[in-house]
Image (cartoon, rainbow, N blue to C red):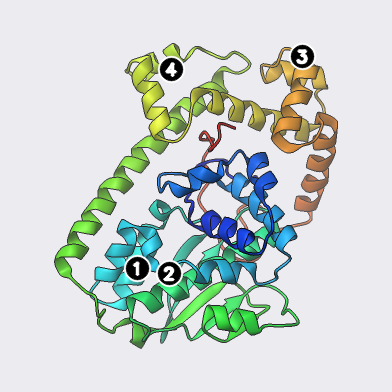
Amino acid sequence: MSVPRVATVGPHLLRHLVSLADERDVSIDEALRRAGVDRGSLDADSTRVSLSQMRLIVAAAGAALDDPALGVELGRRQPVTVLGMLGLAMLSAARIRDAIEVAVRFQLLAGSPVRWRLEQHERSLAVVAETYTGDPSVDRVLIDAAFAHFTRMVHDVSAGTVRPERVDLARARPADTSAYERGLGAPVRFAAAQDAWWVDARLTERANPYADPWTFTSTCAGLEAEAASAVDRRELVARVAARIAAELPDVLPLTAHARAASMSERTLRRRLADAGTSYGALVDDQRRRLTERLLAASAPSLGEVAAAAGFADARSLRRATRRWVGMSPTEWRRVSAHRAAQHCDGPGPGKARDGGELLEAESPVQTAVVGGR
């Protein structure tokens, strides 16, 4: 599964990652530069990065910091208030359960790099976390950060009266588990079937000490409106991306796409920018996706791949693949063939490798990433 290149991930975790690296005198500026992320832009709540950018930065920072419990430390640093309006909705919810449910319901607006879902069990409520970066070392950091953040949020909302009963992690038990149990606030069970944060259902029925029904209603209404707007933006971007893919190797002028969408070129350009992308970024992403499919097919020559993707020649293709994945087309083809062979030995279509259900289909678009990459 390829890593989504949609800029939907909020800046919160990266802010704390940069801060932690600075505290430990470790520079991750080169990783930020390679990902096209400007350090200063992380101060803006409107900033969004793609999961592929997040993967690159977290992988580099993890190697530089060499901290097995890096994710736990990052998560516990993030109070409920980092979520802005969503954090206020959680704080004003009537019950702890309502706060948890609203966090999961509007998680995409919070820009979480991890997908959460709720599971109701007989005596417990489980928050199950899933990642899809394709890099196990990065997934571990993101999962740990998500659960430590959840522990911190519930602690904040309940004024310290509610904590998880246990945390399950679907990985081998490390030599030292003390940092996990301190940061996650509960016993940790390793080698579990899935990554899950468990809380006693009776505790979630407790009244929230900060509850205010008027604030909760107004913040939820604002979140609903923001969610509807986000869906509209994603649908527009998806339509333009699909049209670009259908026209390759030809690249139509933006005016043609504006006419198809019944709007002016200026309006389309602005709406794409509102969605965090640009026409050039969408063209580049569709070329990348087509190139990846053709290279995986093995049969076409590099000249044929270049022509099909709209490049002038194989040399232009090589420059593009170096920029996209840091490999030549030949190297990328070899890696793709190896991955295809591994998948043939893995689970069948529609099955998750680790036994969990797959997420919804990935978006076929790439929004413009911070720094203009």
Answer whether labels 2 and 1 touch (C-beta < 8 Å).
yes
Pointer 3: what residue? 313
| Mark 1, secondary structure of its residue | helix
Tell me the kind of residue under disc 1: Glu
Q: Is residue 8 visible?
A: no
**Lower position in the chain sequence, tag 1 or tag 4:** 1
**Lower position in the chain sequence, tag 4 or tag 3:** 4
The crowding category of the residue bearing disc 4, from other C-alpha atoms within 10 Å (few below 14, some 14 to 19, many at least 20), is many
Answer whether labels 4 and 3 touch (C-beta < 8 Å).
no
Q: Total label count?
A: 4
Tell me the kind of residue under disc 2: Leu
Pointer 2: what residue? 118
Residue 266, disc:
none
Pointer 1: what residue? 101
Residue 55 drawn at (x, y percent): 64, 51
The front one of 216 and 160 is 160
| Mark 3, secondary structure of its residue | loop
| Mark 2, secondary structure of its residue | strand
